[in-house]
Amino acid sequence: MSVRKLSLIDILDYMWIILIIVQCHSIYTVKSEPLNLIVPFLVTTAMLLLLNLLRFTLSIKYIYMLGLYFIAMATFFLTNIGANVTPLNITKYFIMLPLFFLINSIYVNKEIFSALLSKFVNVVVILAIFSLFFWIFGTLLNVVHPTSTVINQWSGGQLINSYYNLYFETQQMIFFGFRIIRNSGIFAESPIWGLILSIAYVIDFLILKFDKNSKRNIIILTMLSTISTTGIIIVGLAILYKIMTTSRWMTKLLLLPVTLSLGLSLLLLLAEKSETVSANLRVDDYNIGFIVWKASLWIGHGLNNGILAIQSHISTFTRNLGYSNTLFVILAQGGLLLFLIYFSPMILLLFKKNINLDFKFAIILFFILVTTIIFEGTFLFLWILTLSYSYFSFVTLDKTGT
């Protein structure tokens, strides 16, 4: 079997994807100076865009969509200049996000976007293989030993074991009476690793729809080792959705006991985890988030003040527990205005008749992640938002757009 050589574009694609993933609360980047990450990322992004513009043209209609975004975002920034206008926010929302949109739009327009998504899945699978190896042979069996210790700034400066800087032991929990270290890969906590795995699984299963299950099996095994309730639910819902939409009624009937057994197992997992402090705080997070959002329903408290407003309502807020969902951070930052700027394309795609059901269900699963995990403002979050903008633009253009 011949192996296709990687072009310069392919290499830049992989570099771009790796930077997007690593920036999402990995041990390498937690508490790093934002501009130290943004500068190399912007250089890579600009190079990727330039090389693609040299080989492809982009419909002017995508530029119109970008113009609408600029108008909406500028309006939001003007609602609270003091809390919104900073060099970092300007860079993110008026430089980085438009560059994301242009790159994604070129790929979607030329129908080569699946190749980029496939690269995302490939990177996640490679990270999953490393994390599974070190979790099994290091954390569980102690055949491989830690090579050093590093500081996890996410948890307030806690010292954690490192395995060649490719895997880190960041979290432990009592699980059915046993103390176990969760697989968090290269990330500051296992729910973030579960988030990355969930997105990769949904992309491979519902969007790319590859027949081979090997990558998805690796992702599922890794997901189980994270003991991430949200991640396991996302994978379970995706599988159940596929069964219900593609199988015959007899198959559905035969699988009903299996589904009930899995559901019962998941309820036991939820019951076990509900005894933890973090689970109790998660419920409080929703209550506090709603209170903060209600205080400024339409325009929020500002990009820089949203999380501060939430923290001000938490009497014993600690950095190692943090806040647990993206949705109310967005609502606290910018109210319904910012929510609509972010998610209008996804919401509109849900109601478009020419969008296949698999893609719509992928959007629903993403909204579940938004309500259960904190990753607002990360490169990954912004990239996914621009994917929806690009795809919405693509499906609403007439077929003569080039």
Image (tube, rainbow, N blue to C red):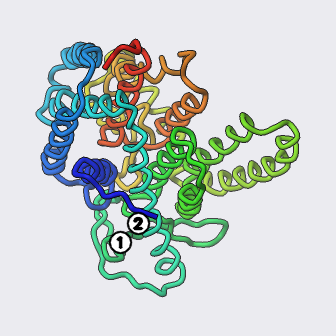
How far, Cα to Cα, is label 1 from label 2? 6 Å
Q: The C terminus appears in which quarter of the rendering? A: top left
Name the residue: 32% across, 23% down: 334
Query: Is residue 50 or residue 235 the one in the foreground?
Result: 50
Numbered-mark total: 2
The image position of residue 181, as x and y in percent, is 50, 70
Q: What amino acid is labelled 1 in the image?
A: Ile
Does the CB distance between marks 1 and 2 fall below 8 Å?
yes
Q: Is 349 situated above or below 90?
A: above
Name the residue: 29% across, 19% down: 62
The image position of residue 10, as x and y in percent, is 29, 50
At numbered mark 1, what does the secondary structure look like: helix, strand or loop?
Answer: strand
Q: Is 116 situated above or below 397?
A: below
Query: Is residue 38 or residue 298 the one in the foreground?
Result: 38
Q: Is 59 situated above or below 152?
A: above
Query: Is residue 126 or residue 11 the one in the foreground?
Result: 11
Residue 137 in sight: yes
Residue 184 in sight: no
The image position of residue 152, as x and y in percent, is 31, 64
Name which quarter of the figure residue 179 lies in: bottom right
Disc 2: which residue = 170
Name the residue: 23% across, 15% down: 67
Query: Is residue 43 or residue 32 the one in the foreground?
Result: 43
- How packed mark 1 is, by other alpha carbons closer than 10 Å (few <14, some 14-19, many 20 or more), is some
At numbered mark 2, what does the secondary structure look like: helix, strand or loop?
Answer: loop
Disc 1: which residue = 160
Q: What amino acid is labelled 2 in the image?
A: Thr
Left or right of residue 296: residue 207: right
